[in-house]
């Protein structure tokens, strides 16, 4: 058993997030594990850029009110206790509503040695896309 020291919170980089987003790494997956878990905190209006994951992603909302959308789908409101699964390769974004903060656990796996990146990042979500709810 190993008890890992708590690491400082990290500001989400502007190329991947719009607005104020902070995350804490909970699990970084040492081989053979490829599990990744972050606690992600979004200020009102903050959101990810469009992105997808090689092996899919699971989000579990712990507080606040958020939004999520798959490319071509509707913007859906998400609340504490809800779990959202996005399959491998599905482009999506997630973030807080304009009126609320939102925190979720983000859980995903790396694809393994030599199998490409665990996540691909695209363009920022436009204000029109964000407001289409």
Image (tube, grey):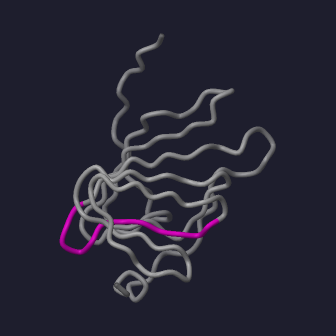
Span colored in magenta: 90-101
Residue 85 vertical placement versus 123 (above, below): above
Residue sitting at 37 percent across and 45 percent down? 39
Residue sitting at 44 percent across and 83 percent down? 126
On the rendered structure, is 43 left or right of 132? left
Q: Nearer the viewer, residue 42 or 105?
A: 105
Q: Position of residue 115 (x, y in %)?
A: 79, 47
Residue 95 lies within the magenta run: yes
Which residue is farthest front? Answer: 82
Q: Nearer the viewer, residue 40 or 14?
A: 40
Q: Position of residue 84 (x, y in %)?
A: 44, 58
How many numbered marks, from 0 up?
Answer: 0
On the rendered structure, is 21 left or right of 25? left
On the rendered structure, is 133 left or right of 111? left
Q: Nearer the viewer, residue 123 or 118?
A: 118
Which residue is farthest right? Answer: 114
Residue sitting at 46 percent across and 73 percent down? 69
Residue 49 vertical placement versus 117 (above, below): below
Residue 50 lies within the magenta run: no
Q: Position of residue 31 (x, y in %)?
A: 67, 27
Q: Assign the C terminus to one quadrant of the image.
A: bottom left
Q: Position of residue 114 (x, y in %)?
A: 81, 43
Q: Nearer the viewer, residue 18 or 33?
A: 33
Residue sitting at 55 percent across and 83 percent down? 72
Which residue is farthest top? Answer: 1
Task: State which quadrant residue 56 falls in.
Answer: bottom right
Task: State which quadrant residue 123 falls in.
Answer: bottom right
């Amino acid at each position: 058993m190993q008890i890992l020291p708590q690491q400082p919170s990290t500001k989400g980089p502007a190329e991947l997030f719009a607005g104020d987003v902070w995350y804490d790494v909970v699990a970084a997956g040492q081989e053979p594990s490829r599990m990744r878990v972050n606690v992600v905190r979004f200020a009102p209006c903050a959101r990810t850029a469009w992105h997808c994951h090689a092996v899919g992603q699971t989000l579990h909302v712990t507080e606040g009110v958020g939004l999520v959308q798959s490319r071509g789908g509707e913007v859906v409101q998400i609340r504490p206790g809800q779990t959202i699964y996005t399959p491998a390769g599905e482009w999506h974004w997630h973030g807080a509503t304009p009126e609320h903060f939102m925190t979720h656990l983000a859980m995903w796996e790396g694809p393994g040695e030599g199998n490409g990146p665990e996540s691909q990042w695209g363009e920022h979500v436009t204000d029109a896309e964000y407001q289409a709810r």
